[in-house]
Amino acid sequence: MQYLTRPDGSVPSNVDIAALEAAGILIVRPTPRPAADPGMVVVEGPPENKDGLWWQTWIQEIAPPPAPAQIPSSVSLWQFRAALRLNGNFERVQYALAQLSSPENIPAAELFEYGNTIYRTSALATELIKILGVTEEQVDALFIQADQIRV
């Protein structure tokens, strides 16, 4: 909303209030935005007439839920291993991967040990689901947690 008033609510002398009101334009005086209560947001409300003057109002609405976190397609392996440590699963995964001996599983173990990046759709991520006995959603949450780790 645009205002023709000064911050103190007064109207400059060169504004023809009667002409504006005759044209259906209200002179709405600003009011400070109040702080929002927890879980709420403050938005501009409809103007309110007090003693013949129009004043800006504010109303509180329930804050929208936060946007769901995006699942990263990849994270650095140091972040991923840190997330596993924070969840108490690092040693379990490390031990299980060390036990893999079939030719198709060896790359997953080597990637976990020496790689730089892990991709959400990689064989290692698939192997982790088996090792930890977790759901796809839980692995997604692990990738989200890993992506948020900063040093």
Image (cartoon, grey):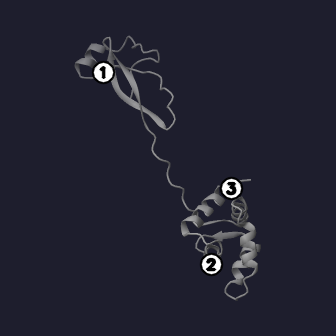
State the residue in front, 133 or 20: 133
Residue occupied by mark 1: 26
Quarter containing the N terminus = top left
Q: Position of residue 46 (x, y in %)?
A: 34, 27
Q: Quadrant of residue 88?
A: bottom right
Of callouts 3 and 1, which one flags the residue occurring earlier in the amino acid sequence? Answer: 1
In the rendered picture of this protein, how many numbered marks are placed on residues?
3
Relative to residue 5, is residue 135 depicted above or below? Answer: below
- Per the rendering, the mark at residue 88 is none
Q: Quadrant of residue 56?
A: top left
- Per the rendering, the mark at residue 149 is 3
Residue located farthest toward the left when viewing the structure as drawn = 22
Tag in front: 2 or 1: 2
Label 2, label 1: how many angstroms apart (C-alpha)?
A: 65 Å
Q: Residues within 10 Å of mark 2 (few under 14, many from 20)?
A: some
**Three-letter residue code for mark 1:** Leu
Whether residue 114 appears in this view of the structure is no
Relative to residue 36, is residue 108 depicted above or below? Answer: below
**Residue 19 left/right relative to 4:** left
**Three-letter residue code for mark 2:** Ala
Q: Position of residue 8 (x, y in %)?
A: 46, 15
Residue occupied by mark 2: 123
Q: Marks 2 and 3: in contact by CB < 8 Å?
A: no
Q: Secondary structure at mark 3?
A: loop
What residue is at 69 percent from the left and 79 percent from the top? 108
